[in-house]
Structure formats: structure tokens, C-alpha cells
Amino acid sequence: MAIEMQAPKGTKDMLPEDAYKWQYIEGVFRNVAKTYGIREIRTPMFEHTELFLRSVGDTTDIVQKEMYTFNDKGDRSITLKPEGTASAVRAFVENRLFNEAQPTKLYYVTPAFRYENVQKGRLRQFHQCGIEVFGSNAPSMDAEVIAVAMDTLKKLGLKSLSLNINNLGCPECRPKYNEALKKFLQENYDGLCDTCKSRFEKNPMRILDCKEKKCHEITKNAPIILDYVCEECGDHFGKVKEYLDILGLPYTIDPGIVRGLDYYTKTIFEILTSDFTVCGGGRYDKLIEELGGPDMPAVGFGMGIERLIMTLEKEKIEIPKETLFDLYIGARGEAEGKFAFKLANDLRGLGVKCEINHMGRSIKAEMKYANKLGAAYTTILGEDELTNKKINLKRMSDGEIFEVSLDNLEEIAKVVR
Ligand code: ATP
Ligand code: MG
């Protein structure tokens, strides 16, 4: 008996009827990125596990609970990438792109893998559009990166967007904050989940991002890092806000966001729709050096494509549908069928999207099928058409007929496209 196969939990097939949505969203994102001079980078789907331990951080949820890690046949520990930043930084360092004139502005569209509790907007393979900008300290760059995300979301037609920002400080000011936080958490240590207990010494800030209810309760009134940042981080944040004001981008300061990755410094941000956090990012000035590169600042974001699509659907924002076929060529007999076969091939050479009958359908069934496919024009080849070298192109939207010569393929292409 045949086994009924199913896709693994937390994964989704992207069927042809949905692929146009993906292409559209990616296209909007790519075009926005281009207006900022951001160029594409493609990195491998998997990396050495060590890369994520060192970048995402070994006390994060991602590393502690969510990574797809396995030993390959050469006994190397390999991990499917849970996010895009670490790989981009690794590639930047490994290929010595830091020797070129800066900044380096990169974008990517990539799958990411996390072993999560599957629920609405939370998959195990999901996809991100993201950018990473290396080499600039400037607060204007933080604002520009946020603007790329906002431009993309607005171009997609999303309106009710909230931009939340926070300042995570730097290795100068964070130890002081960590001490204050530990002091506060000390009293409730026993009430923390086991994972957070293990984070207490090493990385108490991670406890603020714990999804466990009891930890969330405990941290509600915790001291906030904004009260502890050093002068430089404070100044930087002030200027980021100024640049956001210049762009007319409203924001809310949310001292509660710490983000789920360890590498962030200074500015972090999230963009929320009515249902989801669709985008998260921030500055990570120490990561390039941490991964063996020079001391170079960086800032970027990742945006979840599945959540974007769900939001567009919920807000009833139409994604322009592509015409699948410009022209459907029907044929009455065998000779006409062969002619149609060659004609379709020649028209495709001119960029016309066309289709012929490969199913042995009757003319009537063919036209019904062409209609179902949403062909913009149809034509039927019979003996007369081949003898007179003239065909009728029927515009399906209103039934109007255009007579064209079979000797002039350019003209046919012009009419139907
Ligand atoms: P969340 O707080 O919702 O878990 P996150 O902080 O883990 O998000 P990031 O690592 O910043 O998310 O990833 C950037 C974006 O990728 C998120 O804003 C979201 O849109 C998307 N994303 C993250 N995890 C998933 C997932 N498991 N399934 C679908 N999309 C996801
Ligand atoms: Mg998460």
C-alpha cells in the first residue's frame, strides 16, 4: 500500500497559485533596496554550528531550543540557518569585503529554520527579506535601515504600522545594567524557568525576552536599560530619533524590547502590524570583530515574508495577479495543431506567453479551458486561417476581435501583450 506523505510540521508548500504573491513581495523589496544602492548577497543554507553559537548567542532561545543541528557524514556540526545576519557577516569577513570602500550594503531573501511551537505566523521553515549595512557608525544609517523596511511595507500597501525602538547600549554600559537587573531578579530567582536560571549569571538580559509566562510576570517591573546607557549610546540614540523625525517616521520608544539575538548594540527596532511583529532589526557593532573581522559597525533587519502575506490578506490588500497567458491558440485538426505548436514556439521567442492544446480537447472544451486559465486573447486555427494566412485574435475581456496576418508575428505579439 502506498504511504501517504505529508510535509513536515511547520513547513508549507508554496503552490503556483501563491507564488505570484511571493514574487511580488520580493520584487517590491528588491526594488526598494535598489533605490538605496543595496546589493544582493546569497549565502549557504547551512553553516558551521559554531557560527550561530558565537553570533546569535548561546543563551538565546534560538540556540538553546530552536536550531536544526546535525552532524554531517564528515562529523562536522552543521546548522540550518536560523536567521540571515550571521551568514552575511561571515561572508563579509571571509571574502574580505571590509577592504573595499565602505559602507557595504547587502540584502537577501532567504529561508530560515527554527524548531518552534508551530502556530499562526510561526513556522519551522519560514522566509525573510533582510538587509545588512556594514561600516557605518552614523545614526543616519540606523534611520536609513529603518526607512528601507518602512518603505517596503508602505509600497506593499500596509498602513497601520507601528515602529518601536529601543537602545540596548554597548559593552561599556551594559555590565552596569546587568548588575542592576540581577539585583532586581535575585529576589524572584526561584520563580524563573530553568532556562532563565541558567541565563541569570551569564546573560540576565535574555530573561527579559523569555516567552514563559512566569518569567514575563517577574520581569514586568525590571529596571530598564535606557536608564543605564552611557553618554555615547545616549547621544547616538538621540540622533537616530532626530533622523527618524527628519524622515517623518513616527516611532514609540519601547524599553521592553530586547530582541532574541545577543549581538545587538545601541538601536534596536521592531515593526508591528495589527497581528504580528513583521520586522525586527538593529545595530550590532561588535559582531564583525567577534567573527574574526576588523572592528567595524553594522546595522540591519529581517522581515518575515509569511507574516507579511498573512497581513496583506487580513487587510484585504490585493496583490496584482499576473496574466498567465497572453494568447491561447486552439486548433481544429492535426495539421492546424502542428502549425499551432510551431506558432506558439515562435511567439514565445518574442516574449508572448502562450499555450496550445496538449490534452486532445475539443475546440469548445479548449476555449472553456483558456477562459479558466485567464488567457487575455484566444484564437482558433482552421483550414481557412492557414490558407488565407489571417487569424482572429479575440480579446476575452470584451469579445472584441482583431484580425492579424499570420506572416506578421511582431504584430500578433503587439496586440496580445
Ligand atoms: P518573534 O518575537 O515573533 O519570535 P523574532 O524576534 O524571533 O520574532 P527575528 O529573529 O527578529 O524574529 O526575525 C525577523 C522576522 O522574521 C520576525 O519579525 C518575523 O516576521 C519573522 N519570523 C521569525 N520567526 C518566525 C517563524 N518561526 N515563523 C515565521 N516568521 C518568523
Ligand atoms: Mg522568535
Image: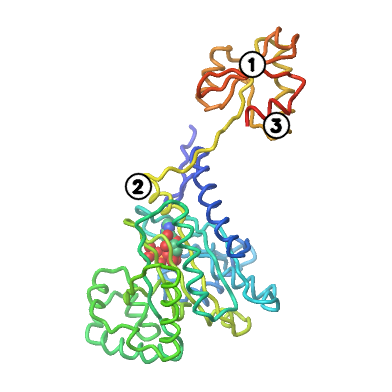
Give the SS element for disc 1: strand
Amino acid type of the residue that numbered disc 3 sits on in the rendered structure:
Arg
Q: Which of marks 1 and 2 is nearer the N terminus?
A: 2
* Comes first in the chain, label 3 or label 1: 3
The local crowd at label 3, few if under 14, some if 14 to 19, many if 20 or more residues have their Cα within 10 Å, is some
Q: What distance separates the C-alpha of mark 3 from that of mark 1?
A: 18 Å
Q: Which of marks 3 and 1 is in front?
A: 1
Looking at the image, tell me whether mark 2 or mark 3 is earlier in sequence order. Answer: 2
Find disc 1 in the rendering and name its residue.
392
- Give residue 404's position: percent from left, percent from top: 69, 19
Label 2 sits on residue: 314
Residue 150: x percent and y percent? 45, 62
Identified at 41% across, 67% down, the residue is 249
On screen, residue 252 versus residue 138, left or right, reads left
Instruction: Report if residue 66 is visible in the image.
Output: no
Is residue 174 depicted above or below 311 in this figure?
Answer: below
Please say if 370 is above or below 134: above
Q: Could you say whether the residue bearing mark 3 is in a helix, strand or loop?
A: helix
**Dividing the picture into quarters, in which one does residue 178 lie?**
bottom left
Q: How far apart are marks 1 and 2 (CA)?
A: 42 Å
Kind of residue at badge 1: Asn
For the residue carrying disc 1, how many other residues have a C-alpha within 10 Å: few (<14), some (14-19), or many (20+)?
some
Where is 174 relative to 110, above or below?
Answer: below
* Residue that mark 3 sits on: 348
Query: Is residue 97 at all visible to an observer of this figure?
Result: yes
Q: In which quarter of the image is residue 78?
A: bottom right
Front-most of residues 147 and 309: 147
Ligand 1 has an atom within 8 Å of the beta carbon of the residue at disc 2? no
Check if mark 2's residue and mark 3's residue have beta carbons within 8 Å: no
Q: Distance between the residues labelled 2 and 3?
A: 37 Å
